[in-house]
Image (spheres, rainbow, N blue to C red):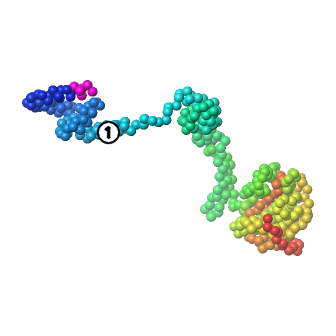
Amino acid sequence: MISVILTAVRSLRRAFMPRCDLVLENLALRPQLSVLSRQVARPSFHRADRLLWVALRAVWSRWIAALVIVQPQTVVRWHRAGFRLYWRWRSRHRDGRPPIDHKLIELIRQRWTANPTWGSPRIRDELAKLGLNVSASTIRRYRPKFERPSSQTWQTFLRNHAAQIIAVDFFTVPTATFRVLFVFVVLARCRRTIRRIAITEPAAEGWTVRANHAAWKRTPDGVTSVWQTGHMPVLTYEGSFGDAVIEVDFKFHAEPGKWAACRISATNPKLNPRAYAASVWARASLDNSGRPLGMVLEHDEWKPGVITTVDTRPAAFEPDKWYTLRMELIGDRVLATCNGVSVYGPHEKFGVQPKTSISLGVGTCPHELRNFRVYAAVPNPAWPAPAAAKPAPKR
């Protein structure tokens, strides 16, 4: 700033100098400015220098002719920057929110630390009881930053549990002779080793089975149902079956509030969707479906909720005792036998061919199943005369 003042004083002194001396001084200064502009590519200007050129631009119309080491666009930019600073100063806020006392900030942070489960409204109400009126947004602003431990990444989880992770896949493989093979693979992730692999012919072999409902546990002889809530336990065998004899041994353990029964159902979900073409029940206790006790032969339509009862016979079944439920399905006729009691009858839906699904259902109390068997069948001339089919009410 002092240099600018000295320059202004010298300029006033030169106003009283002879014109010849001014011309000679300019002649001596111009070459020196040319040498300086060649040696210094971008000379630095102080704030006072910029103010001087902004003032000259305002009062001197020929200021551009005197520029040597600075561009005219630079001077214009300085002028605009000064204009913005001036109006920013004029537009400053003189009134606003009063500052928060430092002791109040410490009190807010102390409340947050002592009560981490409190929210901003709770702390605001507590401070209001002390006569301190603070908004919830202000309290959130001064909330202390809690450093939470970062959770492990998915890659770290896989690395830590690689020894316990296995990959299971079940897929089909077409062969060169146009056959389809079913492949079951269990792969250990840690070493990429195959723990188990099984290959078989199509599901007509009857070895593919899935638990449709509830849980099942393996036993030395077969499986045991475990029911908690919801649908009754069901096991489904998938394959391709025509006329067949289906047998299964079952035993139940009585429990209060639960019912006991065993059911064999055969159907084709594609040809007879949402229905069991043929079902036979061996019922030891009642449930909410309205079916009678004993042996029941029926056709069950799920979607309309209509059960067509083909034949029923009373029968008694005791807990903790093994029984064999046998179902002979030939054409549109079914003969079912259990504990010396038989039910028999025809139905048009019984004849849907081929059967691709056999379901074994049990009641809600624990049941054990073993010795599931499927045989090819031929007509039996000793079958009894069929009973008249009678539809049951909707459930």
Whether 383 is drawn above or below 34: the answer is below
Q: Name the residue tied to disc 1.
A: 83
Write down the quadrant of residue 126 in the picture: top right
Amino acid residing under circle 1: Phe
Q: Position of residue 272 (x, y in %)?
A: 72, 68
Viewer-proximal residue among 156 and 86? 86
* Position in image of residue 101 (x %, y %): 53, 29
Which quadrant would the C terminus be assigned to in this image? bottom right
Vertical order, 262 against 7 (above or below): below
Q: With respect to residue 229, does 51 lie above or below?
A: above
- The magenta region covers 1-6
Mark 1 surroundings within 10 Å by alpha-carbon count, few (fewer than 14), some (14 through 19), many (20 or more): few
Characterize the magenta stretch by its predominant secondary structure: helix
Position of 376 relative to 24 (above/below): below
Q: Is residue 351 or residue 192 the one in the foreground?
A: 351
Q: Nearer the viewer, residue 116 or 170?
A: 116
Instruction: Tell whether 342 sits left or right of 183.
Output: right
Q: Quadrant of the N terminus?
A: top left
Residue 166 appearing in the image: yes
Where on the picture, by quarter, is residue 14?
A: top left
Please give the name of the residue rendered at 88% of the width and 55% of the height, measured from the top-left corner.
Answer: 322
Name which residue lies at 15% across and 26% down: 13
Q: Is residue 177 left or right of residue 310?
A: left
| Residue at (20, 38) in percent of width and height | 60
Disc 1 element: helix
Give the percent coordinates (x, y) of residue 326: 84, 63
